[in-house]
Amino acid sequence: MKIKLSSVLVNNQEKALKFYTEVLGFVKKTDIPVGEFRWLTVVSPEEPEGAELVLEPNANPAAKTFQEAIHKQGIPLTAFMVDDMQKEHERLTKLGVKFTMDPTKTEGPTIAVFDDTCGNLIQIFQP
């Protein structure tokens, strides 16, 4: 068994695609129309055949309620690993990304949290 797909709920797929590719640096992998939405995935350019992140519309009222509640509580929806936290934090800040937590050393990894502009808080971590 392997993890091949994981989803983030987004309130606007086009806006999410722009943020996840142009700001975070992921690459669009799949873009298939499905009714009024799209089956839209991105991957890391470092692992183009690795796990895909589905930019999943939050059109379901339960999904929207969940997304809004965990955002309000300050809980990241998911986490991405980075090799150099300071460099990534500086790069993203210059691109206008709003951090809700600047890089912080924990007992384990160094973590930071930012808003993806699509309804989610995302954590980045450096082991």
Image: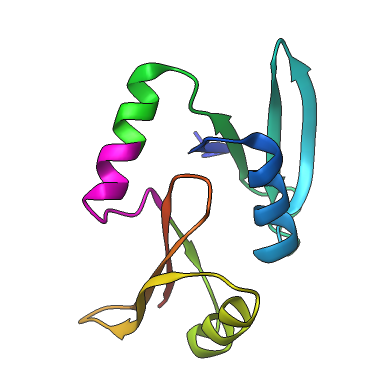
Q: Return the residue nearer the eye: 69 or 53.
A: 69
Query: Which residue does the image show at 34% across and 54% down from the upper left?
Result: 76
Badge count: 0
38 vs 112: above or below: above
Residue 107 position by quadrant: bottom left
- Left or right relative to 86: residue 62: left
| Magenta stretch in the rendered image | 68-78
Query: Which residue does the image show at 26% across and 56% down from the upper left?
Result: 74
100 vs 34: above or below: below
Residue 62 x, y percent position in the rendering = 33, 20
Q: How is the image coloured?
A: rainbow
Query: Which residue does the image show at 38% across and 74% down from the upper left?
Result: 112
Question: Is the C terminus in the top left, top right, bottom left or bottom right quadrant?
Answer: bottom left
Query: Which residue does the image show at 21% across and 51% down from the upper left?
Result: 73
Q: Return the residue nearer the eye: 16 or 85.
A: 16
Is 20 colored magenta in this rendering? no
Residue 124 x, y percent position in the rendering = 45, 68
* Residue at the extreme top of the image, as rendered: 35
Residue 8 x, y percent position in the rendering = 49, 40
Residue 110 position by quadrant: bottom left
- Left or right relative to 84: residue 44: right
- Left or right relative to 62: residue 46: right
